[in-house]
C-alpha cells in the first residue's frame, strides 16, 4: 500500500517562505512523478508543481519563480520550497503520485498540509 505523507505546513506572513515535504515508504518518491496540488476553501484543487523521475519539473503560472520542487534522495522526499508567499497561496497542499505498473494506473494522495499566509 502506497502512503504519501506531507509535512511542513504552517502559518506565515506574506513575503515569507515555507518548505513542504512529501515522504513515502520505499522508493516511491524517487521512481515516480510526484505532484504537489493545492485546494483553497471553496475552490477546485489545482496542480502547483510536478517533478518526474528524471528530474523534469513543471509549474503552474501562478507560482513560477516563487516555488521550487525538488527531490531529496538522502531524505527520500520531494520538497516544495515556497518563497515570496502571498495570501492567495493559502490552501491545503497535497502530494500525489500515479503508479502505472502493474496496470491499471492507481492514484495516491497524502492527507494534506495546511498553508496559511497572512497579509
Image: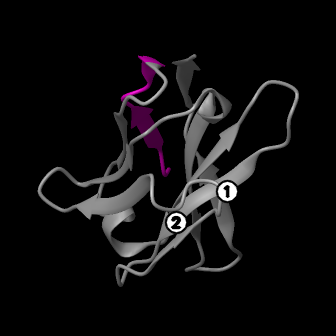
Residue drawn at (53%, 62%), measured in percent from left and top?
A: 64
Quadrant hosting residue 42: top right
Q: Position of residue 92 (x, y in %)?
A: 62, 30
* 73 up-or-down from 58: above or below: above
Q: Is residue 11 magenta?
A: yes
Residue at 77% across, 45% down? 45
Q: Which residues are drawn in magenta?
A: 1-12
**Percent of width and height locating residue 18:** 36, 33
Element under disc 2? strand
Residue with the mark numbered 1: 47
Residue 104 vertical placement versus 62 (above, below): below
- Asked if labels 2 and 1 touch by Cβ distance under 8 angstroms, the answer is yes
Q: Using the image, determine if residue 104 lies above or below residue 109.
A: below
Query: Image quadrant of residue 10?
Result: top left
Circle number at residue 50: 2
Tell me which residue sits at (74%, 31%) in the image. Answer: 40
Amino acid at each position: 500500500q502506497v502512503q504519501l505523507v506531507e509535512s511542513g505546513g504552517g502559518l506565515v506572513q506574506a513575503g515569507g517562505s515555507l518548505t513542504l515535504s512529501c515522504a513515502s515508504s520505499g522508493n516511491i518518491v524517487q521512481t515516480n512523478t510526484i505532484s504537489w496540488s493545492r485546494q483553497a476553501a471553496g475552490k477546485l484543487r489545482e496542480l502547483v508543481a510536478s517533478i518526474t523521475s528524471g528530474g523534469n519539473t513543471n509549474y503552474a503560472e501562478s507560482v513560477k519563480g516563487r516555488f521550487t520542487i525538488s527531490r531529496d534522495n538522502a531524505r527520500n522526499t520531494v520538497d516544495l520550497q515556497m518563497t515570496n508567499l502571498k495570501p492567495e497561496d493559502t490552501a491545503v497542499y497535497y502530494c500525489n503520485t500515479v503508479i502505472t505498473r502493474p496496470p491499471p494506473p492507481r492514484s495516491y494522495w497524502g492527507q494534506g498540509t495546511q498553508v496559511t499566509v497572512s497579509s
